Image (tube, helix red, strand yellow):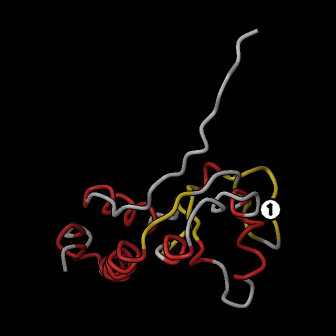
Amino acid sequence: MTEETTENTKATFEDMPEEELAKFVLDFCDGKIFSSAHISKEQDGHILGMVFMPLSLGALSNYTEEEIKNIGLVYEYYDKAGPRGINDYPMFFSCRMMTSGDWAKASQAIKREEERRKDPENSKLNPILEDLRK
């Protein structure tokens, strides 16, 4: 029998590279992502940890209050959802987090991308990277 050690490590919340953020925006607009932004404000406080189970199981226990305040969005891809849901929301056994700064940029880019998709003339445009730089 070998002895196995595990370190209690934590991920760092850093801004995403622009290309990764652009992919997030497109995937969000394509309906591939479920996020904390999809949860109604009335239910946010008590259901977030039931939708994103790692939050209920202490995923943020090693983080400072300042680090937690820098989380702008909790999300995961729908294909990672479990077989059951809670209160008409999917349940995830994993989750990803986005910084507040990235979420501010992404949410604006999502709005502009959704507007572009409403107009067929704009469908051939893909200036997401430009939107993220604003």
Q: Vertical placement of 29 versus 105: above or below?
A: above
Q: Quadrant of the N terminus?
A: top right
The total of numbered circles placed on residues is 1
Q: Vertical placement of 126 versus 8: above or below?
A: below
Amino acid bearing label 1: Gly
Look at mark 1 in the image and give the residue it sits on.
85
Q: Is residue 80 left or right of residue 58?
A: left
Q: Position of residue 49 (x, y in %)?
A: 74, 68
Q: Is residue 47 left or right of residue 60?
A: right
Q: Mark 1, residues whose alpha carbon is within 10 Å: few (<14), some, or many (≥20)? A: few
Q: Is residue 42 left or right of residue 20?
A: right
Task: Compare residues 98 and 13 and report the one nearer the observer.
Answer: 13
Identify the residue at horizontal 42%, vertical 70% (top origin). Answer: 99
Which secondary structure lies at badge 1?
Answer: strand
Identify the residue at horizontal 60%, vertical 56% (top origin). Answer: 95
Quarter of the image for residue 119 reads bottom left
Q: Position of residue 31 (x, y in %)?
A: 52, 64
Task: Compare residues 34 and 72 and report the one nearer the observer.
Answer: 72
Q: Position of residue 25 (x, y in %)?
A: 38, 66
Q: Is residue 45 left or right of residue 79?
A: right
Quarter of the image for residue 123 reads bottom left
Instruction: In the displayed orientation, state which residue is furthest to the top.
Output: 1
Task: Compare residues 86 and 113 and report the one nearer the observer.
Answer: 86
Quarter of the image for residue 20 reads bottom left
Identify the residue at horizontal 80%, vertical 62% (top origin). Answer: 85
Q: Vertical placement of 108 versus 35: above or below?
A: below
